[in-house]
Amino acid sequence: MKNIKIEICMGTACYVLGAGELLDIGEQLPAHLADRVTVEGCSCKEWCQQRNLKAPFALVDGTLEGELTLEKLTGLIKEKLL
Amino acid sequence: MNRSAYIKRQLLSEVMKYAFSGELKEQVDRIPVSLFPREQASYRCCIYKDRAMVRQRILAILGFSHEQDDEIQPLSHFAGLALERKKVPGDSLTLMPELCSGCDGGKYKVSDLCRRCVARSCSQACPRNAVSFEGDRARIDQESCIKCGKCAQACAYHAVSYQPVPCEENCPVDAIARDEAGVRYIDKNKCIHCGRCVTGCPFGAPLDVSHAVDVVQGLLRGRKMAALLAPAVLAQFPEDPARLRGALLEAGFAAVYDVGQGAAQVAGMEAREGMERIEQGEDGALFSSCCPAWVLAQEKYLPNLEKQLSHTPSPMALTSARLKELEPELQTVFIGPCFAKKEEARSLETVDAVLSFEELGALLMARNIQLEDCPAVGYSPLPGWEAAQPLHWSFAKSDGLSENLLFAAGQDARVETVAGLDRKQMKKLSMADRFYSKKDFVEVMACTEGCIGGPGCLVPPEKAIKNFGFK
């Protein structure tokens, strides 16, 4: 069974636009999925400098995702794991 | 994070970014268009309504109230005024009409969950015969309805509910009024500037009026500016406050001070004031005076408590006065969770501008300052206050002042905390004889959980408590 890693940018723009709450995603996932997800914060990698995507950013199993909310992130995790 | 707050923070950072780069007049009208391009799905009826909303949000960010708007003037006109003004805006809050959806609420309504049943329990339950059955569902005659809620309780399908008007429900002092079209506005005579309407409105119509442009201009013009950080700053950023001090210095502030030191002094002064009252046999508890929304509430609505309100200045007033004494040319910028502080600052000569933590976050975003790259700068006591009480973070949360009062006045002191001024609490306070007569001190904070629950915070109070171990 696949496990995935999520790296959430904790740079200033991402943090101000809601990255802080994304770190708690583990608490919001059902247990059988939460066990397969590792969540970490990472430093700013200037993903926000791209004009077509918006903060907050995270690498979800290697894919860069933008404008994340808890809801959107949950959906992405389920896509990857199920 | 709710989308209204997200939009506000995006806009704050865009406006500040252009203010810093000197392109505000040229670029500000482009912001609604670039953030709300024609092909994007709209929040309101169409993308043009969204842009009209954004225009008024930007007006508030530039420091203008709804009365000052002129629909045929582009934002560049207002940006020009903001860049040239010599004093910060007068209002702290405004309700922008384009954002207001004119809620037809404060009523019980029948939804399409109604199945037009045979029992008609709703009508049976109604003490005023206000429920009738023309059409496809039950209907409530709002003229007769007394809002008892019995129909809602009686309905087996939960088809009847109370639809609130969030700004009005949240306001503890009934300061929201409406025009003929149902668009709300803030009655300035009644408002205590607590900001509950701002956080409560799902359309983001009530807004704080920002000093952002004034602060950016000050920094650009090389004025000597001091940041005065409220104790609630502890929980706002993921990094240690020492990095935040470093970040403010990177942003161009000449110095950073912690108002927590002023708060520690205020606690001592209030304790002494309270003990004098007891010695002199004065009736009733001493009520704290550090929360400006509470002070306004007392002045406007609770004249009976006038003699019981502490004369001790607030930590912001004390700290800024001390700094101006030492250096009259210093520009003092209070940075905190509070909108009412802007109103308090109007009557003080010693505070030049007030920013919220949200605005601070946006400022750092606009300058692309990363906290982890900034030097850690330790707490430094105010010059001349080196021997005084050190800085206290405990004041950020309700009970913090109370604990310090107990420490200063002795554990026998009878201290009560009022953490959050809502309508119910205002009612209790109007009967202070009944509820607070057996107390020596009452700490009153307008925001739930105290200052960490303030409307200008970057994180909700539960997160602040969780992350930073407030009790």
Image (spheres, helix red, strand yellow):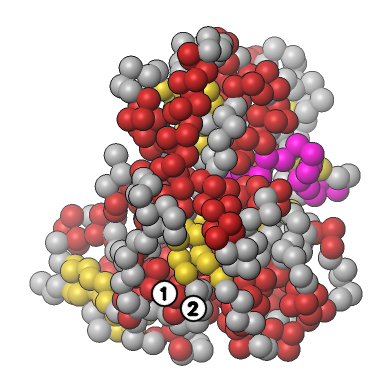
Is disc 2 placed on a helix, strand or loop? helix
* Alpha carbon distance from label 1 to label 2: 6 Å
- Classify mark 1: residues with Cα within 10 Å, few (<14), some (14-19) or many (20+): many
Is residue B264 visible to us here? yes
Q: Find residue B251 and name its label.
A: 2
* Chain at tag 1: B
Left or right placement of residue B272 versus residue B225 in this view: left
Magenta highlight: main SS: loop
In this view, B109 is above or below B203? above
Is disc 1 placed on a helix, strand or loop? helix
- Residue at image coords 58%, 16%: B432
As for residue B193 lying within the magenta part, the answer is yes
Point out residue B247 in the picture as x, y percentages from the top left corner: 41, 74
Left or right placement of residue B298 versus residue B413 in this view: right
**What's the residue type where badge 2 is placed?**
Ala
**Disc 1: which residue:** B247
Specify whether disc 1 shares its chain with disc 2: yes
Please report the bounds of the magenta region as a residue range. B181-203
In this view, B13 is above or below B301? below
In this view, B426 is above or below B125? below
**What's the residue type where badge 1 is placed?**
Ala
The front one of B23 and B42 is B23
Point out residue B38 in the picture as x, y percentages from the top left corner: 68, 82
Callout 1–callout 2 Cβ contact below 8 Å: yes
The front one of B359 and B442 is B442
- Residue at image coords 51%, 74%: B253
As for residue B62 lying within the magenta part, the answer is no
